[in-house]
Image (tube, rainbow, N blue to C red):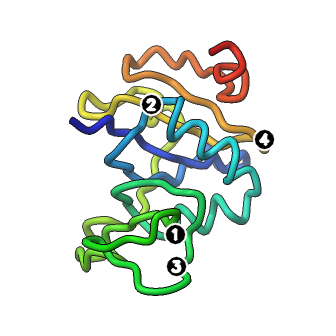
Amino acid sequence: MSTRSYIGKLDDKSNDVKFIYCHWDGYPEYVGYMLDTYYKNPEKVDELLNLGDISSLRENLIPKGKHDFDEPEEDVTVAYYRDRGEPWNTVAPKHTQLANYEKGDDMIDYFYLFKNGEWYVDRENGLSLWTRVSDLLQNK
């Protein structure tokens, strides 16, 4: 069974959140760890979001060789548009205001937010109880 998550980045000036959907392994011990370890650079976060919705998050974004949905490279993120040929208009990054992002979505288990150079996570509950991913992982 999938553990779905949203991965977003806050624009401090406009309070806009640009975000994508991630289908697999959304729990903090995996997606949270991957984001906090491999996606700390704002430019790399932008590169990730610009892929659109993803099936699975991995250490790298750019394939070195043959890579697609059916035969992905082991350490490369699998994106619906690039790797499976999904229509861009159905998987493109979405935008919303922070207050709407915080309200949650019944189909999403975890919400990740990159703000002020750090990753935060909240569970699907609409309570906006953001926890810094690095703190959460330290306490495990």
Location of mark 4 (residue): 116
- CA gap between label 1 and label 4 equals 19 Å
Question: Neighbour class for label 4 at 10 Å: few (<14), some, many (≥20)?
Answer: few
Q: Which mark is residue 62?
A: none
Location of mark 3 (residue): 63
Q: Please report the residue visible at 31 percent of the width from the left and 68 percent of the height from the top.
A: 80
User: Disc 4 or 3, which lies upstream in sequence?
Assistant: 3
Location of mark 2 (residue): 27
User: Disc 1 or 4, which lies upstream in sequence?
Assistant: 1
* Position in image of residue 118 (x %, y %): 74, 39
Mark 1, mark 3: which one is toward the viewer? 3
Which image quarter holds the N terminus?
top left
Location of mark 1 (residue): 50
* Position in image of residue 6 (x %, y %): 43, 43
- CA gap between label 1 and label 3 equals 15 Å
Residue 133 against residue 18 in the figure, above or below: above
User: Disc 1 or 3, which lies upstream in sequence?
Assistant: 1
Badge 4 marks a residue whose secondary structure is loop
